[in-house]
Amino acid sequence: MAKPQIYDVLHREHEEVSELFHQLEEARGAKALELFARLKQKLIPHSRAEEAVVYPRLLEESRTADNTREGIEEHKQVDKLLAELDAMTPDAEVWPAKIKVLADMVGHHVDEEEGELFPLARQVVSDRESEQLAEEFARERDAFVEDLRRADQRDAAE
Ligand SMILES: [Fe+2]
Ligand SMILES: [Fe+2]
């Protein structure tokens, strides 16, 4: 069987994030808090591993550099909103609005990655390299997942 390419791995995670947003937009109270925690566990390692493995490679190529820089800025906006949501609970009046804006922002970002950045990346990254990127991405992502898990345990122990 062919090894997965980086686009396959990222696409699968984009779908998982989108599904979590659908559930999160309907949820209230403790359920919303639990779904928000799951969203962060999925989205943050995804973004950090893109920044560590995928974006640096695409910044090297003139064809993909502009879209990549845009992606990096969008990640920063997403991080800002995540931090704002972290500082409140789902009973805050503004919570549903912030979740909606976050979902729109991430949806737009994913559309640009899949619709613009990846097609350009396929022109400059070979299939073989794309498979290697998929492996490196998975390694980095798993390391970030582990970091988050440790941080959560520390918080719980405090
Ligand atoms: Fe992504
Ligand atoms: Fe991204």
Image (cartoon, grey):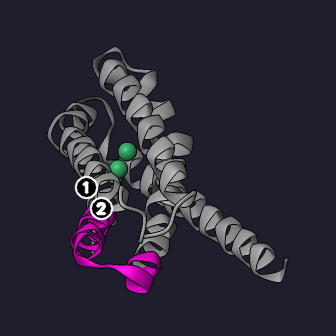
Q: Please tell me whether residue 117 is drawn above or below residue 102 in the rendered image.
A: above
Is the stretch drawn in magenta largely helix, strand or loop?
helix
Occupied quadrant, residue 16: bottom left
**Mark number for residue 96?**
2
x, y percentage for residue 106? 29, 49
The answer to whether the residues at label 2 and label 1 have Cβ atoms under 8 Å apart is yes
Amino acid on which disc 2 is placed: Pro
Q: Which residue is mark 1?
A: 100
Check the picture and name the quadrant holding the N terminus. Answer: bottom left
Q: Residue at x 35, y 26 (%)?
A: 70
Occupied quadrant, residue 65: top left
Check the picture and name the quadrant holding the C terminus. Answer: bottom right
x, y percentage for residue 2? 28, 68
Residue 15 among magenta residues: yes
Q: Is disc 2's CB within 8 Å of ligand 2? A: no
* Residue nearer the viewer, 40 or 110: 40
* Residue nearer the viewer, 76 or 123: 76
x, y percentage for residue 114? 20, 45
